[in-house]
Image: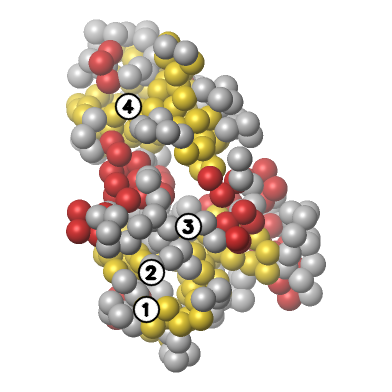
Amino acid sequence: MSKTNQNTIAVYPSDAFVVTDGVAEGDVMSFMDELVLDDVYQLTTGSQRKALIYEKGDGSAFIIAEETELGTPGNLLYLDCAITLMARDSTTYEALVLVEVEGDEAAEVYLMPLATFEPESIYRLVGADRESAAAKFGDVACVRFARGTHITLASGAQVPIEDLNIGDRVLTRDAGPQAIRWIGETTLRAVGDFAPVVISEGALFNSRDLILSPDHRLFIYQREDRLGAGRSEVLVKVRHLINGDSVYQLDGGFVDYFQILFDDHQIIYAEGIAAETLLVDSRTRKALPDDVADGEFIPDHAAAPHQDFEVTESLANRPDVVTLLKRASSS
């Protein structure tokens, strides 16, 4: 299957999150029907989130892909529930529980935190529900620009994203001027998968600091294939560019995010560099407002040819990747 139809999430296997106090003491993370409220969980020493790669399946299930780091390729993957945990200081944390199924049996359970969990901390289970899980799962995949990001209009004007209006014509890389169909605004806790990534001014020839959601992808044309991707055009998630210096993550506090939606998935220019807009598919649609999620308003976006150009984490996971991409795009 084309990588266009694949998605990667960072998860813990069930045995990385264990009940240390409570009714189910000693048990590992499980699906909703087996969870007990007020049980206290803790990450096991040395636990690391790993890549679970899945493809779109039929109905409510996904299919685990061949390139996955966790799970068995070909097995079904279900989104089970959303859980709420409370730390000692009463701060609440959310996570999603996914279940891998082989035949008619659960083969593994995975925990997808929506915030950063620390091994030395304890987390009391205070809530679990299935109704909100799909929306929260889709929310992570919805790419966003932070307040203040300058977007290039068809006229060449640079306008802060919060000043854009529905109907404004934006310059796109592949389809010329395109009218905005919808703009979304939300304020989120800047933690975990929602903590914004800052690309410092000039790091990739951007005219100002560019602040994006972690799974946001940049489109980069390499005059010379320095990454070894086998092609000149690449899409790179900004989370894979983090080097702690010119690209870093702001974890903590709150962030004002904006989404831009067009009739099709587009590549636009933000602070002078190419970045994607919201891709509407079966996952992200569940995170949109009801009036926008209606398929008659905007149907699922067909995959553009450049969608196959996403660079895998294994290829981008090198400390000099930002420098290499900057050189490659200017050689």
Who's the residue at 64% across and 56% down the image?
A: 309
Q: Is residue 100 left or right of residue 205?
A: left
Who's the residue at 71% across and 71% down the image?
A: 329
For label 1, the residue is 179
Q: Quadrant of the C terminus?
A: bottom right
Secondary-structure class at tag 4: strand
Question: Is any atom of residue 70 visible in this view?
Answer: yes
Which of the two discs, 2 and 3, labels the residue nearer the N terminus?
Answer: 2
Q: Residue furthest front?
A: 296
Mark 4 and mark 2: span between their CA atoms? 31 Å
The image quadrant of residue 255 is bottom left
Mark 4 and mark 3: span between their CA atoms? 27 Å
In the image, what residue type sits under mark 4?
Answer: Asp
For label 3, the residue is 302
Q: Nearer the viewer, mark 4 or mark 1?
A: 1
The x, y position of residue 117, in whole percent, is 39, 34
Secondary-structure class at tag 3: loop
**Relative to 73, residue 9 above or below:** below
